[in-house]
Image (cartoon, rainbow, N blue to C red):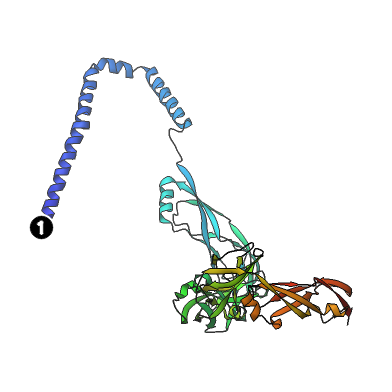
């Protein structure tokens, strides 16, 4: 340790010696030479005495120095005051009051401080950063109050101004109410497409909200915000989320940040499932094939598809329809089609399908006496009858390949008329026919029938 100190002292000695030599060479020696020259030049004492003893000399020197001083001050070469100012903007305002008993309204979040004084003191004030604006409400009661904003002024040599210097605020007695919790789930689209949130169980059903009476009346709901993205779920099961945020909303759905909620967070248990349903793919040809040709077979490479989504959505889907354009088709063709995901379905086991269509020679077969049904009639107000015997049944011509026609039964064909939005009276409506096999085409020999609609 002693050796290290000796080395340090030796190093300082070398540095000081070097500095001394530089000062001696650059400053002391030149100044000594100049002083010697001046002294030698004015060594004639009689000349100096004669000048100093002249009465006008001191007057001229004084006048010259006074003029120099005037211009120095006037041009601000010499600053006699050295006073400057700075503004500290957006300084937070702290409230000192009984938070358990009162709610304060009308207090600005920040204020500005103007500091005035010497530049060195201002610099120190900026570096300290210990600036505090406060409103002392400890001795005030409920009602409208005007309170001065206080500043701690850490540098006492500085003068200051505060904006605002005072605040008019309202002090309300704090009250509390019990509210039922509901759940709001965010980022469900961030879950794996095969997963859904089927249930959320909170560790409590009610919370306490606190504010003044009129403010609590505007609270429409209090929700637990469950973030599905925070679950990091990779499979079905139960997941626990702690510190779930609680938020109060007004009737417009706007978040109310000034409502105190006790507790401010809760724990939620989230159940994740993977509902699925297998539905068949139904290929529907659109358009009319070329004359003399008929569709013999329609064969998709995917017969069915597994759908994933909410159970309510899956319950309403019984098949997945794929449309192909066969207009003018007269020979075999292979289609590459995309499967359209139904609304509410999150994922499908297949997204594309290859469909092979085989064409053969067209034949036809007539089915007589297919009964006509009435559809979309408001039966609570009206009833409908066929105007005559001919309007109760139709003959249907079915075209296609012979192998399919031979398998078709009259019960596979339906004929109907649409009576929606019709007024009472005798009306003529078009006949629509269809069959269970989409590879065949169905045509009614009777295109229009007459129906009598009456009020009940």
> At which x and y percent is residue 219?
65, 74
Q: Which residue is mark 1?
A: 2
- Nearer to the camera, 325 or 89: 325
Secondary structure category for the residue under label 1? helix
Badge count: 1
Q: Position of residue 238 (x, y in %)?
A: 47, 83
Residue 105 image offset from top left, x and y in percent: 62, 67
Q: Indicate the quadrant containing the N terminus: top left, top right, bottom left or bottom right.
A: bottom left
Q: Does the rendering let one see residue 453?
A: yes
Quarter where residue 64 is shown: top left
In the image, 427 versus 279, the foreground residue is 427
Q: Is residue 19 above or below residue 269?
A: above
**Mark 1, residues whose alpha carbon is within 10 Å: few (<14), some, or many (≥20)?**
few
- Image coords of residue 202 (percent x, y): 53, 83
Height in image: 371 above or below 321?
A: below
Q: Is residue 221 above or below residue 290?
A: below
Q: In the image, is 334 to the left or to the right of 390? A: left
Q: Nearer the viewer, residue 437 or 136?
A: 437
Residue placed most toward the observer, 345 or 330:
330
The residue at the point 60 percent across, 59 percent down is 166
Report the residue at 57% width, 72% height from top.
298
Q: For residue 442, what is the image quadrant? A: bottom right
Instruction: Specify the quadrant that holds the C terminus.
Output: bottom right
The structure residue drawn at horizontal position 84% and vertical position 77%, both measured from the top left corner, is 391
């Amino acid at each position: 340790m002693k050796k290290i100190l000796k080395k340090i002292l030796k190093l300082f000695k070398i540095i000081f010696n070097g500095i001394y030599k530089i000062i001696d060479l650059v400053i002391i020696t030149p100044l000594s030479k100049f002083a010697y020259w001046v002294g030698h030049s004015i060594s004639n004492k009689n000349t100096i005495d004669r000048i100093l003893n002249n009465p006008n000399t001191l007057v001229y020197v004084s006048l010259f120095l006074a003029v120099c001083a005037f211009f120095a001050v006037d041009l601000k070469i010499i600053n006699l005051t050295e006073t400057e100012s700075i503004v500290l903007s957006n300084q937070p305002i702290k409230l000192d009051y009984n938070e358990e008993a009162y709610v304060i309204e009308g207090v600005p979040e920040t204020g500005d401080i103007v500091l005035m004084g010497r530049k060195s003191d201002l610099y120190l004030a900026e570096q300290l950063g210990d600036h505090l604006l406060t409103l002392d409400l400890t001795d005030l009661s409920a009602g409208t109050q005007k309170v001065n904003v206080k500043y701690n002024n850490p540098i006492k040599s500085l003068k200051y101004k505060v904006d605002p210097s005072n605040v008019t605020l309202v002090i309300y007695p704090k009250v509390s109410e019990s509210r039922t919790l509901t759940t709001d789930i965010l980022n469900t689209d961030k879950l794996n497409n095969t997963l859904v949130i089927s249930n959320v169980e909170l560790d409590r059903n009610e919370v306490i909200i606190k504010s003044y009476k009129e403010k609590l009346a505007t609270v429409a709901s209090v929700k637990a915000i469950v973030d599905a993205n925070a679950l990091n779920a990779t499979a079905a099961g139960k997941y626990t989320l702690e510190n779930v945020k609680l938020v109060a909303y007004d009737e417009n759905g706007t978040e109310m940040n000034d409502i105190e909620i006790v507790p401010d967070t809760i724990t939620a248990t989230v159940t994740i499932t993977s509902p699925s349903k297998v539905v068949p793919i139904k290929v529907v040809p659109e358009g009319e094939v070329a004359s003399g040709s008929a569709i013999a077979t329609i064969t998709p490479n995917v017969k069915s598809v597994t759908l994933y989504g909410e159970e309510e959505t899956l319950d309403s889907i019984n098949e997945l329809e794929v449309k192909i354009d066969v207009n003018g088709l007269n020979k075999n063709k292979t289609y590459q089609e995309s499967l359209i995901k139904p609304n509410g379905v999150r994922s499908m086991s297949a997204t594309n399908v290859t469909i092979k269509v085989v064409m053969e020679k067209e034949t036809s077969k007539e089915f007589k006496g297919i009964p006509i049904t009435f559809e979309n009639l408001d039966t609570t107000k009206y009833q409908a009858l066929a105007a005559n015997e001919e309007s109760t049944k139709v003959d249907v011509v079915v075209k296609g390949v012979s192998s399919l026609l031979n398998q078709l039964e009259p019960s596979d064909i339906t004929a109907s008329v649409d009576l929606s939005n019709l007024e009472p009276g005798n009306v003529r409506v078009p006949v629509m026919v269809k069959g269970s096999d989409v590879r065949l085409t169905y045509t009614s020999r009777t295109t229009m029938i007459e129906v009598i609609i009456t009020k009940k």
